[in-house]
């Protein structure tokens, strides 16, 4: 088991991979990748039963990135976990690279579901969870949704299905950074109150600070112990977390830093890493 400081150091490395990849691509979605970096880190380094040497193990836990445009976050944690070389992150979105703008299960080791059309990943995850029940498997399924994404109607169809089927091997995480491409979610098409909506569909609901590893650990421990219903973790996060000028800025939903901005981001992350080394 990793302690909090070790997880925080790993999350800094994951954030650095995100920034490196998006800068190299000259395109991508850094804001929502950075906000969820702590969730990715805990899932892949602590929570999930996985093995990078056997990415197709039928008994592995599954992860679906429903908000597939934040693929740089998933790619970075997969690389740092050993699924493929970290250096390959610099090929993001390049012609001929296997790391394209959305996750591709056919070409990227560790990707369990191709995703990108908002709303669909949750349905796929619910299907995976039901398959596990039918096959009497012990694996768990985790799905990460964006808070803007949950304005999609298909999200609530999947929630109704998962709650009705009592899929207690399913855990949905909502990255609640309160910003989507057009602005604050409560101004575009508010999905609030998110917690009450999931409860109405038969979910056990846990609300946390999604950028704090103590809260994240508590939530996933509680989710694993919950029987008879699926769990929804509402993770309140900061969009662009870890890069000072990106934090809480909708401008960084979907654009890459230029060379000067990249240098500032690297300096922020280096400073954070050095501070953690002093602990």
Image (tube, rainbow, N blue to C red):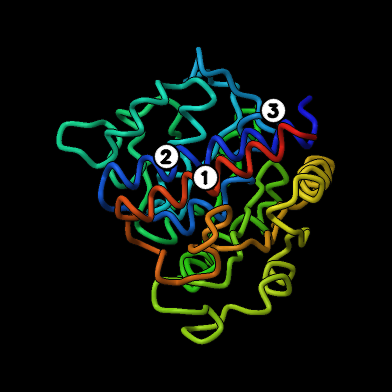
Residue positioned most to the top = 53
Residue with the mark numbered 2: 113
Residue positioned most to the left = 95
- Identify the element where label 3 is drawn: loop
Q: Quadrant of residue 253?
A: bottom left
Whichever of callouts 1 and 3 sits on the residue coming sooner in the sequence is: 1
Can residue 215 be spotted in the picture? yes
| Nearer to us: label 1 or label 2 | 2
Q: Quick one: label 1, few (<14), some, or many (20+) residues within 10 Å?
A: some
Q: Quick one: label 3, few (<14), some, or many (20+) residues within 10 Å?
A: few
In the displayed structure, does residue 259 sit left or right of residue 276?
A: left
Write the residue at 71% across / 32% down: 277
Locate residue 136, reporting x and y percent. 67, 28
Write the residue at 73% across / 63% down: 202
Does 126 appear above or below 87?
below
Locate residue 31, reporting x and y percent. 47, 59
Tag on residue 127?
1
Whichever of callouts 1 and 2 sits on the residue coming sooner in the sequence is: 2
Q: Are marks 1 and 3 in contact (CB under 8 Å)?
A: no
Residue with the mark numbered 3: 138
Number of numbered callouts drawn: 3
In the displayed structure, does residue 209 sit left or right of residue 26?
A: right
Tag on residue 254?
none
**Of 40 and 34, the residue lying toward us:** 34
- Identify the element where label 2 is drawn: loop
């Amino acid at each position: 088991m990793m302690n909090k400081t070790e997880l925080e150091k790993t999350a800094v490395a994951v954030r650095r991979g995100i920034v490196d990849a998006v800068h190299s691509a000259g395109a991508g979605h850094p804001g929502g990748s950075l906000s969820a970096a702590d969730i990715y880190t805990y899932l892949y380094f602590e929570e999930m039963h996985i093995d990078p040497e056997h990415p197709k193990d039928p008994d592995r836990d599954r992860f679906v990135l429903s908000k597939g445009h934040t693929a740089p976050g998933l790619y970075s944690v997969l690389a740092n976990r050993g699924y493929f070389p970290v250096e390959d992150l610099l090929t993001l979105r390049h012609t001929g690279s296997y790391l394209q703008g959305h996750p591709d299960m056919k070409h990227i080791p560790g990707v369990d579901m191709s995703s990108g059309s908002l709303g669909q990943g949750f349905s796929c995850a619910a299907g995976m969870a039901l398959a596990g029940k039918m096959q009497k498997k012990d694996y768990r399924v985790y799905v990460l949704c964006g808070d803007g994404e949950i304005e999609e109607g298909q999200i609530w169809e999947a929630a109704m299905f998962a709650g009705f089927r009592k899929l207690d091997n399913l855990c949905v995480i909502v990255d609640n950074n309160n910003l989507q491409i057009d602005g604050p979610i409560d101004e575009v098409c508010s999905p609030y109150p998110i917690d009450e909506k999931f409860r109405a569909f038969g979910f056990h609901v846990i609300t946390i600070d999604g950028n704090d590893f103590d809260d994240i650990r508590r939530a996933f421990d509680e989710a694993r112990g919950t029987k008879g219903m699926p769990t929804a973790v509402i993770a309140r996060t900061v969009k662009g977390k870890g890069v000072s000028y990106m934090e809480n800025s909708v401008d960084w939903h979907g654009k890459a830093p230029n060379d000067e901005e990249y240098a500032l981001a690297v300096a922020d992350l280096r400073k954070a890493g050095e501070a953690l080394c002093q602990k």
